[in-house]
Image (cartoon, rainbow, N blue to C red):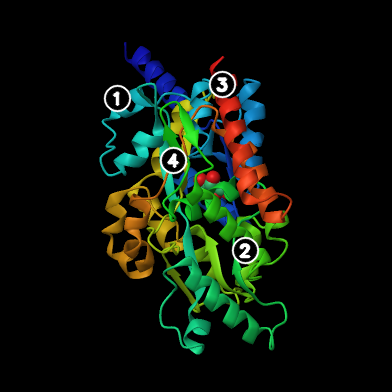
Amino acid sequence: MQRKALILIALAIFTVCSRTSQKVTFMIGGAPAELDYWEALASKFSDSTGIDIAILRQPTDTDQRRQGLVVPLRAGEKDPDAFLMDIVWIGQFAASGWLEPLDSYVDNEGFDLSPFFERVIDLADRYDGHLIALPVYVDAGLLYYRSDLLAEYGYNEAPVTWNELAKIAMEVQAKQRKINPQFWGFVWQGAQYEGLICNFLEYAVSNGGGIVARGESLIINSPANIEALTFMRDLLAKYRISPPNTYTEMKEEQVRSFFESGNALFERNWPYAWGLHQSPDSKVRGKVGISLLPKFEGGHHAATLGGWHIAISRNSDAKRQAWEFLKYVVSRRVQTDFAVDLGWNPARRDVYDSPKVRERAPHLVKLREVFESATARPTLPYYSLLSKMLQQKVNAALSGMMEPEKALDEAQAEAREIAARYKR
Ligand code: GLC
């Protein structure tokens, strides 16, 4: 009897050990310093749980990250077990059946979802009545500025309107060029990729436009949008405050390093840039302010809602272990570290109350409203197709190949075709 009990205990221990020693492959992209941070986080997790995490590194660009995941997921590979997804592709991944529903994990453990932003969970992490992901951080477009230069030229605040931004940028650029010929007034993401749509939406919405659903169709070529796109083109062609490679090369990381090398007055970027701007090798450390993106006269401030969410692959053979890692990543402690160490905007409300965050990342607390009211991109199953088409049109207008009105008229017609094709 005693022997039998001992064997059972040994068996139980063996099962637990063999289960927890299983490796979780985790696919994650980002700036090199952020990836190093993830590596350190994964080893901390492994030390305390015995679950190994193998990090599969991806680039920063969301389109490349999506492609890198679609290939193994579509092929039904076991790896990666877990990954981060951009808020805009979750719907497509869920509809393809690639995501493990998390309801039973949450229910069995009484996992508390109440600290998370409900709007974000409802918008992004539920599909067909199931919870399929958890938010890791919330993004919204922000304006970064050189506080030292603004003060030097007699401005004590960031510009409120886009016209003010253009005016200040022209003045400071002209004067700074005498000392630094590489200097530009304003850097932002104009390359042909998803980030361009995020930028375009901010100008459009802050002018009373946007990609608006009307009945069955989307309105893209409204006068407000045409005006907004014309202004974007003017930043390059008329005011000449943004570098000519804006529409060929500028994505998040190019923009961040440009600003960080001390060669720009204003920058549009996501919250992650804050932490990196303050790093020891940054030339702008301690000289950066952060504010709402400007608006058009009579419009309102707008920021595109972005952010990254963690999920488990349906084909994973280490789901239990992956779930342990998910819980760790979204825990209050780790989310607090993300906010303090990386400047990421937490997806949990309770982190904002932490004294550590209030003291070390006061800008996030101050800008909390921006994150809560940020503009979501349309949640359509064919969003990627729509976005790809619009990226081409908006980019063609920036390069001067097409007039803004023509670009958006064409986008309008093609959006209609895409929607009709998708429904068929
Ligand atoms: C950021 C945002 C993401 C967006 C991407 C565009 O990573 O979090 O939502 O799609 O930038 O480049």
Q: Quadrant of the C terminus?
A: top right
Q: Tell me: is circle 2 under 8 Å from ligand 1.
A: no
Q: Tell me: is circle 3 under 8 Å from ligand 1.
A: no
Give the label, 2 or 4, closer to the camera: 2
Q: Given the image, on which type of amino acid does mark 3 rest?
A: Ala
Give the label, 1 or 2, closer to the camera: 2
Q: Given the image, on which type of amino acid does mark 4 rest?
A: Thr
Residue 409: which quarter of the image?
A: top right
* Residue 209 seen: yes
Disc ID at residue 420: 3
Q: Secondary structure at mark 3?
A: helix
Calculate the distance from the C-alpha at mark 1 to the C-alpha at mark 2.
56 Å
**Residue 212 horizontal/vertical position (percent):** 44, 39
Disc ID at residue 49: 4
Q: Is residue 197 left or right of residue 321?
A: right
Q: Earlier in the sequence, mark 1 or mark 4?
A: 4
Q: Earlier in the sequence, mark 3 or mark 4?
A: 4
Q: Secondary structure at mark 2?
A: helix
Q: Which residue is mark 1?
A: 108
Q: Given the image, on which type of amino acid does mark 1 rest?
A: Asn
Foreground pick, 135 / 377: 377
**Residue 69 horizontal/vertical position (percent):** 62, 33
Q: Earlier in the sequence, mark 3 or mark 1?
A: 1
At horizontal 56% and vertical 55% (from top left) the residue drawn is 34
Q: Secondary structure at mark 1?
A: helix
Calculate the distance from the C-alpha at mark 3 to the C-alpha at mark 1.
42 Å
Q: Which residue is mark 2?
A: 234
Whether 340 is drawn above or below 81: the answer is: below
**Residue 31 horizontal/vertical position (percent):** 61, 55
At horizontal 53% and vertical 83% (from top left) the residue drawn is 149
